[in-house]
Amino acid sequence: MTETRVLDRPSSPEAGTRPPAAPAEITLPIEGMTCAACATRIERGLKKMEGVDDAAVNLALGRARVRFDPHRVSLTDMAGRVRDLGYDVPLESIQLAVTGMTCAACVNRVERALRRVPGVVDAAVNLATGTATVRLIPGAAAAGDLTAAVQAAGYEAQPVGETRDEAEAARQREIRGWWNRFLLGAVLSLPLVLAMAAHLFGWHGPAAAVLQNGWLQLVLATPVQFYVGWVFYRDSYFNLKNRNANMSVLVALGTTAAYLYSVVALLWPGLGTTGLYFETSAVLITLVALGKYLEAVAKGRTSAAIKKLLGLQARTARVIRDGREMDVPVEDVAVGDVVVVRPGEKIPVDGVVLEGRSAVDESMLTGESLPVEKGPGDEVIGATVNTTGSFKFRATRVGRDTALAQIVRIVEEAQASKAPIQAFADRVSGVFVPAVIAVALVTFGGWLAVTGDFTRALLAATAVLVIACPCALGLATPTAVMVGTGRGAENGILFRGGEHLEAAATLDAVLLDKTGTLTVGKPSVTDVVVLALPDGLEARDAGPAAGREAASGEAAPGRGGAGSSDLDAAQRALLRLVASVERASEHPLAAAVVERAREAGLDLDEPAAFEAVPGHGVTAQVAGRQVAVGNRRLMEARGVAVDAAADRLAALEEQGKTVMLVAVDGRLAGLIAVADTLKETAPEAVAALHEMGLEVWMITGDNARTARAVARQAGIPEERVLAEVLPADKAAKVRELQERGLKVAMVGDGINDAPALAAADVGIAIGTGTDVAIEAADVTLMRGDLRTLAAAIDLSRATLAKIRQNLFWALIYNTLGIPVAALGYLSPVLAGAAMALSSVSVTTNSTLLKRFDPMRRFRRQERGRPA
């Protein structure tokens, strides 16, 4: 645990007061140290910093205790120095729910307030979700320090808890608050509007006389101004106190000017004033309240995906305890519990089936339309629906560790993040409000100088202040990101942040790993070819031969055949040797060989001196024989001639099979061919990627001939096949494409593709429903269906297009509205109505993304196929 404390300081009841140079100590966690030299290097680096009095690094604990002057050097600076030295200071994230923000200027102010908290490295605030994500040095600041900083800036904040009930309750309170303000404002403003109409249209009579009474108008307008509008005054106070300005300042200035002008006109009618404008200030505040209400409702709709995911969770579970079944809340299920699921019930948590068989509908999480057959040993996902049989399973992941909880967490983090395009809006909003105030002052001065009409000058300036709302600018990006990431989650596509959502829209090339991405990822042995076994090996494996057909070396297709009768003694001997070596390997091809040997009923030996040669193969000693299994490069490195098998090798590789050469005691003994079936939807997905204008490449460690055969089946041009690439070199191939100026996505299964996934502009992991936490990936495709890759890119393009539309209309609105208001062609009331609708229109435009179907191109193709 990291701790920060001030030394030699008398206690004081006043928070924040400290002597001018009070020393402090901090314990920084440090990762990456390997020896005493590392510790010494970090100590020296920290001691050289101005303001650091002393530093002591403990290699065993992985910590550095630093004595420093917090007025001269910050924790962020010290963490940066450690990183510059080649090590890392791990950071933690704290998420806050922030209320009271009204526009992009508020976002900037909250971010600045949080970044000033000691130990905070970065803070990102999302206006649409009302959340702040703070990255800080662990233990350097508590959640209370962060909420205090937000409150000092004029807003309310609280940590986001384990449950989301409080956040949802706060959102509902915000909606009700704005509705109540609007309702009160509307009731009190309606007589003022009628009075204005009576004046404009020349209505006469007792009712009109009462409505046009100035004192009555004052009584009606004052509660609207100072009760309904109090939120804008309060927000303006904190903004101006912190030398900032936002939408609230504009509203407060404009409405106060109209209100005070009317008060002066009422109290001192002889000062040259020409009328009362109480309706202007009251209606403006009422319309702004209406706009904020509609905006809050629309923002709630953009987060519907999260609510939908949370609604999938089962409420109870049927567990077996003390030998009997009992229903318990899902929160009480523990890892290791045996859970019973009956037809039609939701699976409460993640687990592994122990007994029974059924078909499970996983469409709500993975988008897979057909139920998936489940039996003993298969994984089941919490929140999916059991359709037919009953079964028992052992709980393996519960609470925050379930696939559903991880999905919700990833979507929430993505929705709270900022897309890079948001930086443009942030820069504009940072100077927007002060610039608008300057334009309003120029407008007022210009009208007064040209016409000498104080009233007309005031109304024009008020219209400028009111119409120039930066709300739409602040909501343009986050609302679209929220809907886009939520829509992706509903289709089994998880974006880890807004930046990845935006990057996916700008891709030029897609690099596909072969195994597990283009292919099913479950290879099986298809051929066992014996060339020259050493004497004596066949005797142990003598069994019923299958005639000359078996001697030709072809095993049964599928997962290696039905049993031992399709292999003769020589084949069994070769297979036993190879499987004995491969049982120590974790490679998918090794698993296929071992599985085939077990199906054949072979007793395997324990390998000795096992060695895995990355990208080449494996070697070991088995029953006194030196066995090497791998590709041509492994054989060449060991001086084993392979020319005698060249024709057979080429024939197998042309069929798209991966061939393992087997050498025993330095001589080529045979071949074992393994095939991994191409995914049924792979050609369709590749064709869609080509239609989208993307370069599609395939990368594999397999030989070039096999790689080209698989590429032909998938529809990938042979010139875009990168074969015989070592796992460590995949990242280099990604960088080669990037050096050509291409934006590259790397798509893999996340097992040995982590460096390439990290090197790509967008790293995409393709999983199987439960693989939602592949850390190296920017995007996770929960289904094995490669078509969701095209869907993810389509969705990102649609989202980016929506963001650009929002930004365009927000900028056009202000670009056209301000000059029109300044020239006097727009009354303050109409300006207020336009301002209220601007943010609503942007938010509504974003929610239209909910209608976007990422898989639409494939659904059209399915409808077009003959029955």
Image: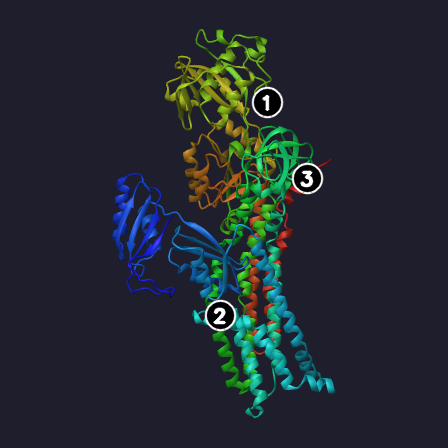
- Residue 433 - label: 2
Foreground residue, 734 or 43?
A: 43
Q: Position of residue 656 (x, y in %)?
A: 54, 26
Rounded to the nearest angstrom, the CA distance separating label 1 from label 2 is 69 Å
**Looking at the image, which residue is at 63% across and 52% down?**
850
Tell whether 323 sits left or right of 748.
right
Rounded to the nearest angstrom, the CA distance separating label 1 from label 3 is 28 Å
Q: Position of residue 529 (x, y in %)?
A: 51, 15
**Looking at the image, which residue is at 42% across and 26% down?**
616
Q: Earlier in the sequence, mark 3 or mark 2?
A: 2
Image-quadrant location for residue 331: top right
- What's under tag 1, amino acid-wise? Gly
Q: Secondary structure at mark 3?
A: helix
Tag 3 near tag 2, CB within 8 Å: no
Q: Secondary structure at mark 1?
A: loop
Q: Secondary structure at mark 2?
A: helix
Q: Position of residue 593 (x, y in %)?
A: 51, 21
- Quadrant where the image shows the C terminus: top right
Image-quadrant location for residue 332: top right
- What's under tag 3, amino acid-wise? Glu
Image-quadrant location for residue 275: bottom right
Nearer to us of marks 1 and 3 is 1
Foreground residue, 88 or 156?
A: 156
Tag 1 near tag 3, CB within 8 Å: no
Please determine whether, in this image, residue 242 is positioned above or below residue 600.
below
Q: Position of residue 603 (x, y in %)?
A: 50, 14
Tell whether 849 sits left or right of 148.
right
Residue 691 visible to an observer of this rendering: no
Which residue is label 1 attached to?
558
- What's under tag 2, amino acid-wise? Val
